[in-house]
Amino acid sequence: MKKSSLLVTILIGVFTMAQKQNLTPESLWSLGRVSIDAVNNRGDIIYGVQYYDLKENKSSRDLYHLDVNGKVNQLTQNKEKKKAVSFQSNDIFIYSMGEDIFSYDLKSKNIEKLNKENEILSGLLYSNDTKYFAISKPVKLEKVEGTDLYPELEKSEVKVYDHLMYRHWDSWKDGNFQHLFIGTSDGEVLDINKGEKYNSEAYSFSLDSKYLVYQSKKLFGTQDAISTNTNIYLYDLSSQETQNITAENKGYDTNPKFSPKGEMLAWLSMKTDGYESDKNDIKIYDFKTLKTINLTSEWDNTVIDYVWSKEGNKIYFLAGINATQQFFELDIKTKKIRQITKGQHDYVGIHLAGDFLVGERQDMNHASEIYKVDIKKGEQTKLTSVNDASYKKINMCKVEERWIDTTDGKKMLVWVIFPPDFDKDKKYPTLLYCQGGPQSTVSQFYSFRWNFQIMASQGYIVVAPNRRGLPSFGIKWNEEISGDWGGQPMKDYLSAIDEVSKESYVDKNRLGAVGASYGGYSVYYLAGIHQKRFKTFISHCGVFDLESMYGSTEEIFFPNHDIGGAYWKNPQPKAYKDFNPIKLISNWDTPILIIHGGKDYRVPYTQGLEAFQAAQLKGIKSRLLFFPEESHWVQQPQNGIIWQKEFFKWLKETL
């Protein structure tokens, strides 16, 4: 190469590097959020890209058509949010926009509105022969509003309940229950759940249009709150009779799917009632033998999602392995399992598109894009590039996998994320990230709030341990957190930060601990036991008092299993005495930022208020960041920006 050419190349490289910037809250929220909606038998993919408008404080989502060769066509373009529901045929798919449902013909580009004026249809699905269709509609079966009970008092704002599960996640129950309706081409529509005070969902038709399968937790009131017993129901379209094919199992049974030829039905199953993070197995029901078989009972891990092979002799599934989420192949006859994909990434969905598997792939430096996977070879090919232009302007962060010894002699995977311009000869403030769940893997996820890339890009090293209780390391590791919230998991956290702090580039005098939900609980708990390790804390929607949490959360089965039950039991479960952060408040002496949402009904906002009030009355530097209209998550764009700005503002002040 000539000297002049070499000089030009160097200058171009320097100029390109100079144009790159570290990730900021604004650039994070400007990224397109890619997700697959529907895939047909031919391999056509309908996906959506959601963008957020910070100024307008809202989002829009348009639909795209993608084939497995990577050809993309934008199908819709306006400022509404659209979601593809299903394919009616290989050429026509159904999508929703607000409360309206449309059909879209991929060949003619013709769009037809399917619902009448003011008619609400949800999840429109056609049988294979299009003789039947299924929809989901709310049916009012309980009077809970003041105006239901006293129509003459039309300006009243009151709710009246006689049972539990009166609210869930971020909404109050309004007396409506989601029912399935079967319609025919002659216009007749039948409520197959008539009179039932239960919600039905996740439905599909058999290939021969003989059955509709769906899942439902047919428990009401307090029983609904204390149990996870969700079952799979088979509805005969001719006889109009319903059969519960999972009655013997008392845990979750979810996500039913017919095999391609219709001779088998598969679903995901957890065996323990009340344990929402139990091992998820794949089961099949054989219509010839009328027997149910557990295909993954001997596999020491848990399944996230699955799809049938074209021939119906195999099932491809998504599962965690060593803090990544990968594709696997399951042979139905031999029960043999083969890992298809490998790498430092997560797949967050799995679909069969022709001869390939497709899914959204992400890692700690990149939001989701769609990839196809060669099933035999495991080769992965990127099909979309929605955010490539943005990432060319953003500096990447090094992500290191480390295995650290725990106090009980086991190995724990810890992710260490470094600033883009990391210099091993400098010292960096370091954050211990505490994961929520509590059974939720610290995998290669890309969050738009708890984003490791943006934390590292602000100049912090991030230490993210896969402490006790996190999936993808075997069932025993996952189960060891239940009943032991403040025990070994806390030791695991401290083992991780203590080990990484031995590195010369970690400033031991500038350590912080941050986390949400159970991670927020962890922060509150560590604040009482950390022995001066940390200089600052941030807790988002954390559990502060196990007793008041038990008395105000909605899904009671969760604390029954993970904490040990009610606080009034005799003897009282160990957690209330030994693992309750409120019992350690006398030890608090470190600045703390407390964040909570007003519509968080899983960990009610009073948990945050209690913690903030205690810190203030003890004279500890503390701040309350309260979002009245947000829930367990922060979902509004401008609120999300403020969350990030206050997060880093606090760290700058205290670390």
Image (spheres, rainbow, N blue to C red):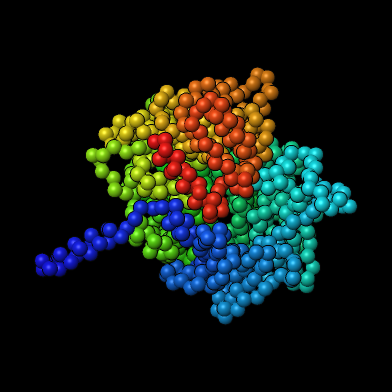
Percent x, y of residue 164:
74, 39
| Vertical comparison of 129 with 269: above or below | below
Percent x, y of residue 458:
37, 46
Q: Is residue 388 visible?
A: yes
Indicate the quadrant containing the N terminus: top left, top right, bottom left or bottom right. Answer: bottom left
- Judge by depth and name the residue closer to the eye, 159 or 481: 159
Left or right of residue 417, residue 55 in this image: right
Left or right of residue 159, residue 408 in this image: left
Percent x, y of residue 476:
49, 33
Return the residue found at the far right. 152
In the image, what residue occupies the spot 72% across and 64% down? 120
Return the residue found at the far left. 3
Quadrant of the rendered structure where residue 382 is?
Answer: bottom left
Percent x, y of residue 65:
51, 70
Return the residue found at the far top. 571
Indicate the quadrant containing the C terminus: top left, top right, bottom left or bottom right. Answer: top left
In the image, what residue occupies the spot 66% across and 68% down? 101
- Judge by depth and name the residue closer to the eye, 162 or 642: 642
Q: In the rendered picture of this protein, how many numbered marks are placed on residues?
A: 0
Q: Is residue 321 visible?
A: no
| Vertical comparison of 388 with 345: above or below | below
In the image, what residue occupies the spot 46% across and 59% down? 30
- Judge by depth and name the residue closer to the eye, 147 or 291: 147
In the image, what residue occupies the spot 57% across and 78% down? 109
| Vertical comparison of 514 with 41: above or below | above
Left or right of residue 134, residue 259 in this image: left
Quadrant of the rendered structure where residue 473 is?
Answer: top left
